[in-house]
Image (cartoon, rainbow, N blue to C red):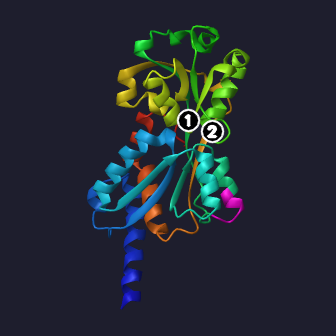
Amino acid sequence: MNGLKSDIRQVFLAVSVTLITCVGGHPALYQEALAEEITIAAASDLNFAIKDLIAEYEKATGNHVKLSLGSSGNFFAQIQNGAPFDLYFSADIGYPKKLDEAGLIMPGSLYRYAVGRIVLWTNQASHRDVSKGLELLRDPVIKKIAIANPKHAPYGRAAVAAMQHFKVYDDAKERLVLGENISQAAQFIESGACDVGIIALSLALAPTMKAAGTYWEIPPDAHPPLEQGAAILKSSKQQMTAQQFVAFMQGTQGQEIMSRYGFTLPK
């Protein structure tokens, strides 16, 4: 009898994944899916976007999501050491590719979900003119510049590459303040602890950040593309539910949320 219930649950979830994909995330058609819980490890540039996604997904399906936000590199190391996540959203598709090569993700689940952008951001109270672009970082009046730690945060590596592209890195490097991840770097500037910083466009477009500061978009050709990748972990006990969340994200409602936060979406 238990085996039959398990089979029925798998069929329900498989059908719900198909419905989400076909109808672009229309909630009325898959409210009947049996409630499950998944755990997601997500790069912190997704902070606001994925919280909106999760809220709409939970409302539509009745399922629950436990979210951990942090740097892609740190999550990569944790997953290698057996961290019990179901889904991994990385700001650098290279990390899930390496997990795929190591046989740690569900076959065929790796996909590019977005391309990120970076901006120069400052708190409005600082009265810095970010329209000057990265040339602003040469100004000696600016004492602290926040970026994510490039050792394990893709957005930190993109920030360094952009500064090198505009030939301001040597002037700025002694004033850099490294956040553990891009969200922490944003907090440093928003709080006034740093004068300016290079953060994800997705964070700059969040309502609280948009109200608190101003930003200048760094040209995408100034740094390697921030191709972001997701994968379902092979160790996951909830692979079907994880597939359901991915399908929701790829549907009309999920794509609208990602676009709202400035992500370029794959075709």
Q: Residue at x 51, y 17 (%)?
A: 195
Residue 121 image position (x, y, % from top left): 50, 21
Q: CA distance from mark 2 to mark 1?
A: 10 Å
Mark 2, secondary structure of its residue: helix
Left or right: 4, with 138 as reference point: left
Q: Quadrant of residue 59?
A: bottom left
**Element at badge 1?**
strand
Toward the viewer: 17 or 136? 136
Quarter of image, res 231:
bottom right
| Identity, as a three-letter code, of the amino acid under mark 2 | Pro
The answer to whether the residues at label 2 and label 1 have Cβ atoms under 8 Å apart is: yes
Residue drawn 36% across and 91% down? 1
Task: Name the disc covering residue 154, or none.
Answer: 2
Residue 113, percent from left and from top: 54, 46
Q: Nearer the viewer, residue 249 or 101?
A: 101
Amino acid under label 1?
A: Gly
Q: Give the magenta part as a residue range.
A: 99-104
**Can you give x and y, in whole percent of width and height, for residue 117 in the image?**
55, 31
The residue furthest left is 28
Q: Is residue 189 above or below residue 115?
A: above
Q: Residue at x 72, y 22 (%)?
A: 164
In this rendering, the answer to whether 228 lies above or below 123 is below
Residue 106 screen position, x and y as percent: 59, 65
Residue 103 belongs to magenta span = yes
Q: Determine which residue is flagged by label 1.
A: 116
